[in-house]
Image (cartoon, rainbow, N blue to C red):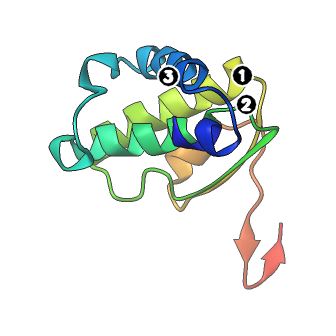
Amino acid sequence: MMPLIIQGRPVKEAEKEAEKLLKTVKLLPRASHRPSRLSGGEQQRVAILRALIGSPKVLLADEPTGNLDVDTSALVFEELVSLVRTHKIGALIATHDLALAKQMDRIVYLDHGLLR
């Protein structure tokens, strides 16, 4: 809710938008939990939702699943890609995980300072 409140949106409107996004990744039942009570995957999904709230035109994500185990990483990345496509947001995602990168529409490699 905070990004919307900072933008000056009414609290009720921010709460409604946050609940809608939390519902999309099945985290609404955990909405009142403190971050320390969420798993790593849940925390990462909340961070992604925080970046998406307010419908930005572009999402920049640097290793959005870097601290997660393989299974959780795959799930969170799948949800990220789905949210980006559903909300029609451009995304630039940096990752070392080629399996995840292959799910994107385009892959650009950074090799010794050169884009390829």
Circle nearer the viewer, 1 or 2: 2
Q: Residue at x 26, y 29 (%)?
A: 32
Q: Position of residue 105 (x, y in %)?
A: 76, 36
- Spatial CA distance of label 3 from label 2 is 15 Å
Q: Position of residue 58 (x, y in %)?
A: 78, 43
Instruction: Classify residue 90 as left or right of residue 76.
Output: right
Instruction: Classify residue 95 as left or right of residue 26.
Output: right
Q: Can you say which quadrant of the picture contains the C terminus?
A: bottom right
Indicate the amino acid at tag 2: Ser
The disc label shown at residue 15, or none? 3
Indicate the amino acid at tag 1: His
Q: Nearer the viewer, residue 36 or 60?
A: 36
Q: SS class of the residue under badge 3?
A: helix
Mark 2 and mark 1 in contact (Cβ < 8 Å)?
yes
Where on the picture, by quarter, is residue 12? top right
For label 1, the residue is 87
As drawn, 115 above or below 84: below
Residue extending furthest toward the bottom: 112
Q: Nearer the viewer, residue 42 or 29?
A: 29
Judge whether residue 39 can be spotted in this image: yes
Q: SS class of the residue under badge 2?
A: loop
Q: Residue at x 82, y 38 (%)?
A: 57
As drawn, 21 above or below 93: above
Q: Residue at x 34, y 18 (%)?
A: 28
How many other residues sit within 10 Å of disc 3, few (<14), some (14-19) or many (≥20)? some
Judge whether residue 102 can be spotted in this image: no
Instruction: Classify residue 63 as left or right of residue 59.
Output: left
Indicate the amino acid at tag 3: Glu
For label 2, the residue is 55
